[in-house]
Image: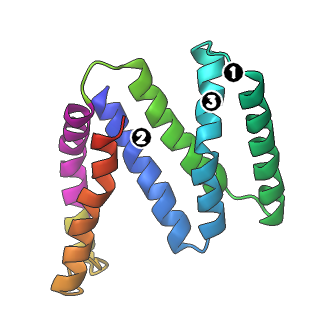
């Protein structure tokens, strides 16, 4: 379960990073903000949760707002849907398999994905494409410091 969650998390981060570095900032932002709506839809369809009438109206308004925003960024790219859906799948995976604490789960996910990340970083370094390892100490520390900042909410927020 944690291995699957680690892979899903990696795909989510990759999708967001790819979108940002390829000029898809608006699409990535919309994908991030549609995530709660995907989570609500999954909870309704698979967990059989019910919404109150006021919550239903809020969801309809949110879907309509995202539809309008999506029309503004034509053509709608995969970045718009990918990030929200992938992160929602991560949440759903963790919701169904509530076996481990958040800290234990994230630590196992990181342990599973670390060898792949190290291999990729070494490959980038050897091919001369690594920014993190070739741009100096400050850049490396920014890259390394981004990890705890990103992971902390996943550990401490339910």
Element type where label 1 sits in the image: loop
- Number of the label disc, if any, that sits on residue 8: 2
The residue identified by callout 3 is 40
Relative to 78, residue 157 above or below: above
Instruction: Tell me the residue at 24%/86% (across/down).
Output: 135
Labels 3 and 1: the sequence-earlier one: 3
The secondary structure making up most of the magenta span is helix
Q: In the rendered view of the protein, which quadrant contains the C terminus? A: top left
Relative to 91, residue 121 above or below: below
Residues rendered magenta in the picture:
102-120
Instruction: Tell me the residue at 58%/43% (across/down).
Output: 35
On screen, residue 9 versus residue 101, left or right, reads right
Relative to 71, residue 54 above or below: above
Q: Nearer the viewer, mark 2 or mark 3?
A: 3
Q: Nearer the viewer, mark 3 or mark 1?
A: 1
Element type where label 3 sits in the image: helix
The residue identified by callout 1 is 51
Element type where label 2 sits in the image: helix
């Amino acid at each position: 379960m944690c291995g699957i969650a680690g892979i899903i998390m990696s795909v989510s981060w990759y999708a967001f990073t790819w979108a940002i570095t390829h000029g898809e900032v608006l699409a990535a932002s919309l994908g991030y903000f549609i995530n709660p709506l995907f989570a609500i839809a999954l909870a309704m369809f698979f967990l059989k949760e019910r919404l109150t009438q006021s919550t239903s109206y809020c969801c309809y308004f949110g879907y309509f707002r995202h539809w309008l925003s999506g029309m503004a960024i034509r053509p709608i790219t995969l970045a718009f849907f990918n990030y929200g859906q992938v992160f929602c799948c991560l949440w759903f995976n963790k919701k169904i398999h509530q076996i481990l604490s958040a800290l234990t789960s994230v630590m196992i996910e990181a342990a599973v994905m670390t060898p792949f990340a190290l291999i990729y970083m070494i490959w980038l370094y050897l091919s001369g494409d690594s920014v993190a390892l070739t741009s100096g100490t400050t850049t490396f520390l920014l890259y390394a410091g981004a990890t705890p900042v990103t992971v902390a909410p996943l550990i401490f927020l339910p």
